Image: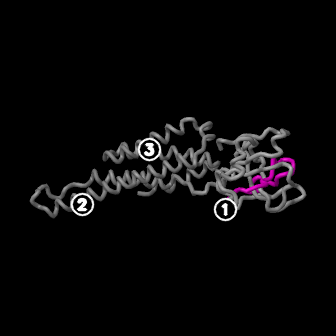
């Protein structure tokens, strides 16, 4: 849980930033230790990887894959069945999304 | 170096967790306790073993005795290492820095327990064996509290205190 920094909210830097993945729950699509270009301009859709603060701990930044889009928000999970998902922390509302991975 | 890595010098970067959150491994202090209890059992048996014949001319009896002692010492050594490995796994993989806030003596607790594993390798010492069991129990208690399931400590004790 070290290395986690909160992105400055409303900063222009959020338009385009890099996310470094830590952990293995998105293997094999996203590799731990790699950087991925992320933007807040792109509208996420099913299959997108989104970056957001953990609803249970705002200091922690998560990256997960969108499995389905519901009126209340995104249902997200990892690629592996044992990872945490919206089942554990709920749907992610659109306004909580910091960015969508745009280049990998 | 891929494009995002090249951009890492000019763009803001953030680390995002794709951890499983539920541990990828299965952590449980019972194995460490079983190993500690095995050490205690071996120490008790070693203290009870007596050479059947002090006459060194009786080679067969001397060999039997040496074999019985050696097997128990080997088992003690093996389980002291197993206990050390199990505790090290909990220390390095299960416990996280935030747990230190609630259990500030955590590092010292593990350090002392691991040292007791070594002491049980070095000596045939009932007190050291009992101290190791107590140290594992202390870690188990913390473990179940961190898991938000303190009642499981009772089940842990029920199983591991009745092994012999």
Residue in the picture at 46% in, 44% down: B134
Q: Are marks 1 and 2 in contact (CB under 8 Å)?
A: no
Segment tinted magenta in the rendering: A82-104
Left or right of B87 in this view: B50: left
For image coordinates 78% across by 50% down, the residue present is A38
**Residue B14, percent from left and from top:** 72, 44
Task: Work out which quarter of the rendered image holds the C terminus of chain A and state it.
Answer: bottom right
Q: CA distance from mark 1 to mark 2?
A: 52 Å
User: Which marked residue is nearer to the observer: mark 1 or mark 2?
Assistant: 1
The residue at 62%/36% (across/down) is B101
From the image, tell me which residue sits under label 2.
B67
Q: How far apart, in angstroms, are the residues tagged by discs 1 and 3?
A: 37 Å
- Asked if the residue at tag 3 contacts the one at tag 1, i.e. Cβ–Cβ closer than 8 Å, the answer is no
Secondary element under disc 1, as helix, strand or loop, is loop
Label disc, if present, on residue B114 of the rendered structure = 3
Binning the other alpha carbons within 10 Å of mark 3 as few (below 14), some (14 to 19) or many (20 upward) gives: many
> How many numbered circles are shown?
3
The numbered disc on residue B23 is none
Residue A13 appears in the rendering: yes
**Chain label for disc 2:** B
**Between marks 2 and 3 in the image, the one whose residue lies nearer the viewer:** 3
């Amino acid at each position: 849980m070290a290395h986690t920094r909160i992105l400055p909210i409303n900063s222009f830097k959020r338009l385009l930033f890099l996310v470094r993945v830590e952990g293995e729950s998105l293997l094999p699509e996203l590799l731990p230790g790699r950087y991925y270009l992320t933007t807040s301009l792109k509208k996420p859709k099913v299959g997108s990887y989104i970056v957001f603060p953990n609803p249970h701990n705002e200091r922690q930044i998560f990256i997960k894959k969108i499995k389905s889009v519901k009126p209340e928000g995104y249902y997200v999970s990892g690629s592996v069945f044992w990872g945490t998902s919206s089942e554990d922390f709920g749907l992610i509302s659109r306004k909580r999304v910091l960015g969508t991975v745009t280049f990998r | 170096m891929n494009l995002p890595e090249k951009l890492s010098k000019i763009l803001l970067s953030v680390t995002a967790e794709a951890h499983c959150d539920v541990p990828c491994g299965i952590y449980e202090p019972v194995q460490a306790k079983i190993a500690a209890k095995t050490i205690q059992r071996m120490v008790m048996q070693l203290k009870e073993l007596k050479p059947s014949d002090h006459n060194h001319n009786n080679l067969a009896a001397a060999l039997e005795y040496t074999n019985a002692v050696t097997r128990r010492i080997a088992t003690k050594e093996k389980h002291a290492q197993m206990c050390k490995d199990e505790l090290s796994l909990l220390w390095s993989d299960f416990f996280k820095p935030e747990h230190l806030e609630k259990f500030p003596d955590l590092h010292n607790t593990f350090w002392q327990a691991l040292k007791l594993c070594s002491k049980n390798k070095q000596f045939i010492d009932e007190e050291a064996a009992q101290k190791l069991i107590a140290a594992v129990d202390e870690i188990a208690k913390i473990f179940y509290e961190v898991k938000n399931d303190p009642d499981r400590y009772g089940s842990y004790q029920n199983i591991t205190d009745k092994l012999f």
